[in-house]
Amino acid sequence: HRIGYPVLVRPSFVLGGRAMAIAYDDNSLMTFLAEAARVSPGNPVLIDQFIEDAFEVDVDAVS
């Protein structure tokens, strides 16, 4: 799938946002991919569409 830039690049098994970055072009994407792979070797690197000026809401529920 093609999602275009900007994208959020992050290692899948790292807590606290370490090595998370926003790539706006091919050069920064390659740099951030290498850093994410270095921080969490052998694990997937996630690339998600980054939506400018958005906010994230988390909801936890127990029943």
Image (cartoon, grey):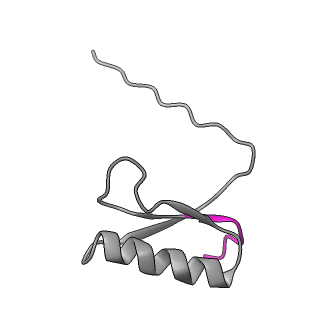
Which residues are the magenta region?
A: 1-8
Rendering coords of residue 63 (x, y %): 27, 15
Give the answer, above or below, for where 17 lies relative to 30.
above
Q: Is residue 6 magenta?
A: yes
Relative to residue 44, is residue 6 drawn left or right?
right
| Quarter in which the N terminus is drawn | bottom right
Q: Is residue 24 magenta?
A: no
Please, what is the dominant secondary structure of the magenta stretch? loop
Rendering coords of residue 56 (x, y %): 58, 37
Relative to residue 43, is residue 28 drawn left or right?
right
Residue found at the very far top of the displayed protein? 63
Give the answer, above or below, for where 44 lies relative to 49.
below
Residue 36 image-quadrant placement = bottom left
Q: Nearer the viewer, residue 59 or 24?
A: 24
Give the answer, above or below, for where 61 lies relative to 23.
above
Residue 59 image-quadrant placement = top left
Rendering coords of residue 23 (x, y %): 63, 69
Q: Nearer the viewer, residue 2 or 6?
A: 6
Residue found at the very far left of the displayed protein? 42
Rendering coords of residue 29 (x, y %): 59, 78
Relative to residue 48, is residue 39 drawn left or right?
left
Relative to residue 42, is residue 34 drawn left or right?
right
Tell me what residue is drawn at x 66 percent, y 83 percent: 26
